[in-house]
Image: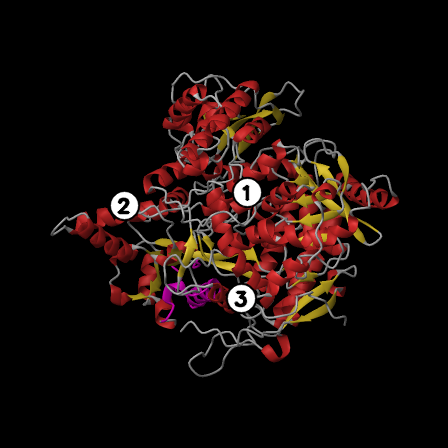
């Protein structure tokens, strides 16, 4: 087994990034004009990277599969963005954000990367405010903060329930400014279908114009992949319908190692599924857990009565409710990290206490928050002896100001009023911590090929804390990659422009075209979605919230069988030389069918429970933590980085040993 | 429920296009409108026909990609939602539903229900930004207090998802609600003041160049907007434009 070089700079953790920046090679402004960079994906990470690289003077070509960068799925992030500003004066600091993130990630992330993330977090807020991002403010005109799961301070900045939208539109505005200056050439409705390597270095991509079907060659001195996560491997997830792993998987097949695919975040607060036709799941922001209390009935009789519609949840008294998170985790209560909250919901539902017809739902109840805020408002507004109705009315107004759009979304989907009756929620796939392996410079194992944002693996370990995805995306794009990529490109100032008329481009293009030709000429009988749904079911049932050896082995075999059938039986209508949405899906699902198997294999070799990865064989057997996940630091404190060798089952494992010098490894206790 | 769908089919930008009738059955009232479209498309693929092309992505009402004109209304009969959040409980068994693309000169049809909205992109590129580089050396975020009211109002304007329903609903195909929302967001914030005059002039000029019509205050855009963007934003844009015409550099 080879040793991966993480290229983490030497020295104390507090100084690493500063020292690194002082010592790297720079490219002078005149030379930047002669260097081209391709950025694939224009969400928070890709959009902010493209804008910053263009500001620095590089020529950027940016690619998005949607009709505009503003549609990237970063836009759907609701709750907020973390930053160690300590505006609340509640004891926050760079170290504390670093500590919380490493602990929240269950000690499976790389310390140096996380520290850097915490360090630049404060700059992100300054930058966004300067760009005109309308963050929430208090009456004194200063920025407001809320708290999120897994931490004991308030460090989350937000813009109503649309923080992702506002941050993305901020990055989009920076992008537009550079497009107008001609420094970014924007390719909307284009999909990257392969990376091109010349002399071992990434030098371009093959992309399909999704309107005309034309296959295009694009060259550059470096390629940045910012294509997001692979949650849609489950078919149902909170990802966008088009979110896919194709760019990440293609670079994996060309030599980029894929790290920790089994680390997936199942988010605790999503709207439960309602039927087989379901196409996606909708998240209800975790910020709701600030004000919502999660419960199921204590007695099975009440469960049955509720399911059959004989009883309403609001009719149950406090004594008849089981606030299971508050019961099991008194210190953190409803604000335990996502993985813990999700498994606790599954535990109650598996035990039969689920509150809807499918038995897969728990309540998220805002009644006590409405009362609390109502009383507070009554005092502020000087309403003495306010009636219960008045208090409820005042409290609901506060809730509306805080979460109005979420409550509206819930009501539109479920047709119930969450101000009056508790929401029903259930966990759903939301985010993938795993991804393409990168070193401290965010470079993959292929020289000149970078990977940023959710698409890489580096910062969240085995579990991501709420409001940290936006932080990482923007940190990578605005503040990290623009430095690190310069160090690499400093050697390229004499290279000149890269030709696309070479055998490397010929070969890559042929491969892409052959695959498209196959899809168009295959005489199968089953739709792409048919296979995607089957893959998703195997993933959810056997590689979902709880995993065991037997089922993981079965999953690997089943996914392989579905894949083989896919290549025989898939049917793609229409033609290749036009807009063809089925063809786009076919390529993406083909890649998911490989990734899913590697995912299961990774889960199989990791015989410990950590973060989002829960192995039923690895739990605490006694003591206060009985039944909780049991990590194994002696044998598994490493990153699994997989090298592609043909079939996913043949992938070769490389281990990056994780060292914790600044944080003591402890069992994560939220009790 | 069982439904009859009349859908605009158009093979490409140069094709004339026509309405085609389809039947779908066993549609659940809990389905979203796009899930109903998925059912139709699965049906079409299985019978060897080409599925209906339509834009969609996040399916939670925030990306702004979906864009259908349903029974004569942008995003259909419900209020405050994009097509992806429209649910079948808004319809009845036996209904005939007409589905067309967003129509405007500046939104040419690409295929079936998919339209080209890059005119919106060019308007944003003309001035929808604050010229600040990513240096990491900007002043502390709290150095400049902004009144809560201004921040909230800016947020309301910034909530626009760029779907184009305002244009599709307007008899003049005006994009003034879309442009007004962006102009307002920055006009309400101190950070936006420095470039305010240039911004509004450049964005409005580009809007006119793209072939969008003018506003005649019918208010259809506000009614159909899935995010409730207010007409006040158009008024504010006009005010900004007048102000800009008085500024001499």
Residue A523 in magenta stretch? no
Q: Earlier in the sequence, mark 1 or mark 2?
A: 1
Q: Are marks 1 and 2 in contact (CB under 8 Å)?
A: no
Question: For the residue labelled by badge 1, is the local secondary structure a helix, a strand or a loop?
Answer: helix
Q: Is residue A378 left or right of residue A237?
A: left
Q: How far apart in space, not on screen, are marks 1 and 2 (Cα)?
A: 32 Å
The residue where tag 2 is placed is: A397
Query: What secondary structure is marked by label 2?
Result: helix
Q: Chain of mark 2?
A: A
State the scheme by which the image is colored.
secondary structure
Q: Which mark is residue A611?
A: none
On screen, residue B242 above or below A270: above
How far across and down, in percent of the image, does residue B19 sit? 57, 22
Query: Magenta span covers which residues?
Result: A331-360
Residue A332 belongs to the span the image colors magenta: yes
Residue matched to label 3: A105
């Amino acid at each position: 087994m080879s040793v991966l070089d993480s290229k983490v700079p030497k020295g104390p953790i507090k100084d690493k990034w500063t020292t690194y920046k002082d010592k790297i090679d720079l490219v002078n402004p005149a030379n930047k004009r002669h260097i081209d960079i391709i950025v694939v994906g224009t969400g928070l990470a890709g959009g902010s990277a493209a804008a910053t690289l263009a500001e620095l003077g590089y020529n950027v070509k940016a690619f998005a599969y949607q009709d505009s960068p503003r549609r990237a799925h970063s836009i759907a992030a609701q709750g907020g963005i973390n930053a160690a500003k300590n505006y609340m004066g509640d004891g926050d600091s760079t170290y504390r954000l670093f500590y919380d993130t490493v602990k929240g990630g269950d000690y499976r992330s790389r310390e140096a990367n996380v520290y850097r993330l915490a360090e630049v977090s404060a700059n992100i807020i300054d930058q966004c405010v300067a760009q005109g991002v309308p963050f929430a403010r208090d009456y004194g005109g200063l920025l407001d903060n809320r708290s999120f799961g897994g931490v004991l301070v308030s460090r989350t900045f937000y813009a109503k329930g649309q923080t992702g939208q506002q941050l993305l539109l901020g990055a989009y505005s920076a992008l537009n400014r550079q497009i107008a200056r001609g420094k970014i050439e924007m390719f909307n409705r284009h999909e990257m279908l392969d990376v091109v390597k010349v002399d071992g270095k990434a030098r371009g991509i093959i992309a399909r114009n999704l309107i005309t079907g034309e296959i295009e060659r694009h060259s550059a001195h470096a390629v940045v992949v910012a294509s997001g996560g692979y949650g849609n491997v489950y078919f149902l997830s909170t990802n966008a319908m088009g979110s896919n792993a194709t760019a990440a998987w293609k670079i994996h097949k060309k030599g980029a190692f894929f790290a920790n695919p089994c680390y997936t975040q199942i988010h605790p607060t999503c709207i439960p599924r309602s039927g087989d036709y379901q196409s996606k799941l909708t998240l209800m922001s975790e910020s709701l857990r600030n004000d919502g209390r999660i419960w199921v009935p204590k007695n099975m009789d009440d469960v049955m009565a509720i399911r059959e519609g004989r009883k309403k949840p609001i009719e149950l008294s406090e004594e008849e409710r089981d606030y299971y998170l508050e019961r099991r985790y008194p210190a953190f209560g409803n604000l335990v990290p996502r993985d813990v909250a999700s498994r606790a919901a599954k535990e109650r539902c598996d035990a039969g206490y689920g509150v809807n017809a499918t038995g897969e739902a728990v309540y998220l109840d805002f009644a006590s928050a409405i009362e609390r805020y109502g009383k507070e408002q009554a005092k502020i507004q000087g309403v003495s002896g306010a009636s219960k109705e008045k208090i409820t009315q005042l409290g609901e107004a506060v809730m509306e100001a805080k979460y109005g759009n979420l409550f509206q979304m819930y009501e539109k989907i479920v047709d119930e009023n969450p101000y009056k009756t508790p929401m029903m929620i259930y966990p759903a796939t939301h985010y993938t911590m795993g991804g393409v392996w990168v070193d401290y410079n965010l470079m993959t194992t292929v020289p000149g090929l970078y990977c940023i944002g959710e698409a890489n693996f580096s910062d969240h370990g085995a579990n991501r804390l709420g409001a940290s995805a936006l932080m990482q995306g923007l940190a990578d794009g605005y503040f990290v990659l623009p430095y690190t990529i310069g160090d690499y490109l400093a050697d390229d100032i004499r290279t000149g422009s890269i030709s696309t008329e070479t055998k490397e481009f010929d070969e890559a293009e042929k491969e892409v075209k052959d695959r498209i030709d196959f899809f168009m000429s295959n005489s199968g009988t089953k739709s792409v979605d048919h296979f995607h749904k089957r893959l998703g079911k195997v993933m959810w049932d056997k590689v979902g919230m709880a995993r065991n050896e037997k089922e993981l082995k079965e999953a690997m075999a089943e996914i392989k069988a579905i894949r083989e059938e896919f290549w025989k039986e898939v049917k793609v209508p229409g033609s290749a030389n036009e807009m063809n949405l089925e063809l786009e899906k076919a390529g993406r699902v083909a890649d998911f069918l490989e990734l899913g198997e590697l995912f299961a294999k990774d889960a199989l070799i990791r015989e410990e429970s950590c973060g989002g990865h829960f192995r039923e064989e690895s739990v605490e057997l006694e003591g206060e933590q009985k039944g909780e996940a049991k990590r194994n630091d002696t044998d598994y404190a490493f990153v699994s980085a997989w090298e592609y060798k043909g079939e996913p089952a043949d992938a070769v494992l490389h281990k990056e040993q994780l060292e914790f010098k600044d944080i003591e490894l402890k069992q994560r206790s939220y009790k | 429920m069982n439904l009859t769908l009349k859908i605009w089919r158009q093979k490409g930008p140069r094709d004339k296009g026509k309405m085609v009738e389809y039947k779908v059955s066993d549609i659940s009232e809990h389905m979203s409108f796009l899930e109903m479209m998925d059912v139709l498309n699965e049906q079409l693929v299985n019978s060897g026909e080409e599925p209906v092309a339509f834009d969609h992505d996040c399916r939670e009402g925030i990306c702004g990609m979906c864009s259908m004109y349903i029974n004569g209304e942008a995003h259909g009969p419900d209020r405050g939602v994009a097509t992806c959040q429209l649910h079948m409980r808004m319809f009845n068994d036996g209904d005939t539903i007409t589905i067309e693309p967003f129509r405007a000169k500046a939104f040419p049809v690409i295929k079936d229900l998919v339209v080209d909205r890059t005119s919106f992109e060019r308007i944003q590129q003309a001035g929808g930004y604050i010229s600040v580089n990513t240096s990491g050396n900007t002043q502390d975020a709290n150095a400049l207090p902004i009144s809560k009211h201004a921040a909230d109002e800016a947020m309301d304007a910034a909530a626009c998802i760029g779907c184009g329903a305002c244009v599709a609903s307007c008899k003049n195909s005006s994009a003034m609600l879309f442009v007004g929302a962006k102009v307002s967001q920055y006009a309400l914030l101190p950070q936006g003041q420095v470039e305010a005059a240039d911004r509004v002039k450049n964005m409005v000029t580009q809007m006119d160049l793209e072939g969008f019509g003018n506003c005649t205050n019918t208010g259809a855009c506000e009614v159909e907007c899935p995010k409730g963007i207010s007409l006040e934003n158009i008024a504010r844009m006009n005010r900004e434009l007048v102000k800009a015409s008085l500024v001499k550099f």
